[in-house]
Image (cartoon, helix red, strand yellow):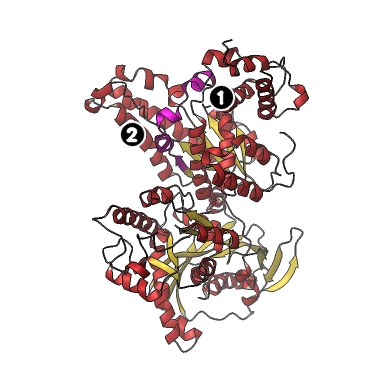
Amino acid sequence: MTGTEDRSATIDSIKRAIRQRERGSGLRGVDYRQFSRQLRELSEAGAIKLTILGNITSDLLVPFLTVSAAREGFQLKCRVGNFGQQFQDLQEESIAAFGADMVLLLLSLELLRPNATSDFAALDPRARQSLVEEISTEISQWVGLAERVTQATIIISNFPQPVYAAMGLADATAEYSEADFFSDLNRSLALLAQQHPRVQVLDLAAVTNRIGRDDGEDRRLFFVAKVGWTERLMAEIGRQFVRHIIAATGRSKKCLVLDLDNTLWGGVVGEDGPSGVRIGPGDPEGEAFQAFQARVKGLKQRGVLLALCSKNTPSEIDALFAERTDMPLVSRDFAARAIGWDTKDQGLVAIAEQLNIGLDSLVFVDDNPAEVALVQSRLPMVETVQLPNEPALYVATLDRLPYFERSHLTDEDMNKAEQYAAVAEREIARADAKDEFAYLRSLGMKLELRAARAADLTRVHQLIAKTSQFNTTTRRYSYGELEDFLASSTFRIDIASLKDRFGDFGMIACMLVDCSDERAWRIASFVMSCRAMGRGVETAMLDRWKKKLFDAQRRAPTRLVGEFIATARNAPASNLYLEQGFTYLDEDAQGVSLFQIDNSTASSPACDWIEIKQEAL
Amino acid sequence: MTDITSRVRMLVVDVLDVPERTVTSETARGELPEWDSLGHLRLMTAFEEEFGIRPSMAQINDTKTVADLVTLAGGASL
């Protein structure tokens, strides 16, 4: 049983093995012990490091966290602090040595403040309220300390409310009831996350509710070991934690691609006709499909792009959307579509091209197992979702997907789908224009350039985390690192926001410049959203620096150095520096290509097609 | 009985991740560095899953040897 595992296992091979096991025997058939052992044997290079602190014996939870993470392709390396030493463990230098990427605080209220549970009925209302304040102050101090000692993403778990109130039915009418106590306490944690961009709340209350207290709680283990969770609950906590990993690393998927017949409505439009398919009130199945469409629409509202990939006659689908205006989803909700008789993998490739995003940013949903299997085998980088036979369960299937998580929604997220809808209108403008420059001028672009401020960091972090194409170094900075850059007097974060007559893109590019060597300013990262490519934004951003260089040049020779690290995805950024008049210098010992420009004589096209508003650099 | 004994032994070997030869019926808690209090918890939860038996707190506490686990798996009280 031991020592026989494949030594050449990788995180991807383990991910595949876990999924295969799941297909065979369901989620509960996954052998966490076996997979966590295989994971321990992997090289730790590149693993996400998690430190777990608090007053819960978290050791038993570790395999559930690592295996759930591996199921989504993340390698997690965990370290568990000392029981009840969450403050002391932060002061230790070991946390710095371990270099945590994420810190998770798990607290049992029963152990933290025994009187909050055992004596609740005996406390007077004011004492209950001050207990909430005391606990939230303690956690807020812990967060403050954690922010100072690490650059990690900080995750705090909230508190499930007891399922039987200490005062019984009378809790409902009590002054400052147990229900008030828990809602205020958990609310105070949510406020912490609102005020501290690096903090996320692990909703243990919701996770516990999903499993139910009877199946989730093990009181024997609580008394024996100070961890009162069943394996089933720990597996669910593991799945929830994956959402935090996705949010913290910015690895959320960008687009949900949907089949049509028997996915968005019941029946087949080619046979039943636009008015014959089941969607909408009056029919149980129709109502289930309507609920699913509404949930899909909710994803669009939080910034997920929607696309259609189906085998239908396009004109029939146009007719259906025109006729069935009672559906929650309308034609304009879809940023891209591949409707026709091509195979689904061809359709997905076309959609990724239309949206200019990677195939690994797509999640494909279909009711037909053959289509799902085809996509799995031909496009393994696309995440696939097999809908169950029962349409009533579609919403729950969608809800269980962790892929679209973000810890904060920015204005850019909220408007994302609208922006993509404007793509088609821009394409018409392009077709009408005489040449590329005429087209660019016709867009009426307005570009705002300035240094980033604290309020911009969430979007800067997201942009850097999610951009793989126009990204010169693909260095993924943590939020904490960006905070340090912002505070530093020698580092500079420049941002660009773009509008045109069709819509507002929001912040679409940023560059990080290290000026600690005043003779050689290094552009450590230049990142631009693919939506802004081909607009001359990079020219405008670098022109600012060339001008600053020219001004500085009169005092002392100074160079601007651009770094470039080639990846499988960032070819679009490979010519950035040459196009902007830099010359290739060398490759350094770490394999970073260096480009430099040391005066402003190199020609750069004036961006007369963009109206630029800028702060002095 | 021998079948249960070997299943229990293999479980101990697997959960504690120790060489097979180090585990006999007489092996006791504390003898193997891996069978510490945390190892014991892992063992008892895995035992529960494997044999479908929910040991009481007293049984978790009183289980000291591989032989005790075998007895527990056989349904006999300690």
Vertical comparison of A484 with B74: above or below = below
Residue furthest to the top in view is: B78
Quarter where residue A415 is shown:
bottom left
Disc 2 element? helix
> Numbered disc 1: what chain?
B
* Residue at the (72%, 14%) spot, across then down: B26
User: Closer to us: mark 2 or mark 1?
Assistant: 1
Q: Nearer the viewer, residue A335 or A14?
A: A14
Q: Is residue A598 above or below residue A87?
A: below
Residue at x 70%, y 29% (from the top left corner): B17
The residue segment tinted magenta is A200-224
Report which residue position mark 2 lands on.
A184
Q: Can residue A577 be seen from the camera position used here?
A: yes
Tell me the distance, in whole angstroms, between the alpha carbons under discs 2 and 1: 38 Å
Q: Position of residue A103 (x, y in %)?
A: 55, 38
Is residue A222 magenta-colored? yes
Task: Name the quarter where the N terminus of chain A is drawn.
Answer: top right
Q: Overall secondary structure of the magenta stretch?
A: helix
Residue A550 numbered tag: none
Residue denoted by label 1: B48
Percent x, y of residue A2: 72, 34
- Can you say whether A599 is above or below A115 in the image? below
Q: Considering depth in this image, is A236 or B74 the residue closer to the camera?
A: B74
> Looking at the picture, how far across and down is residue B46, in whole percent?
59, 27
In the picture, measured across the screen, residue A281 lies left or right of residue A103, that is left
The subunit carrying tag 2 is: A
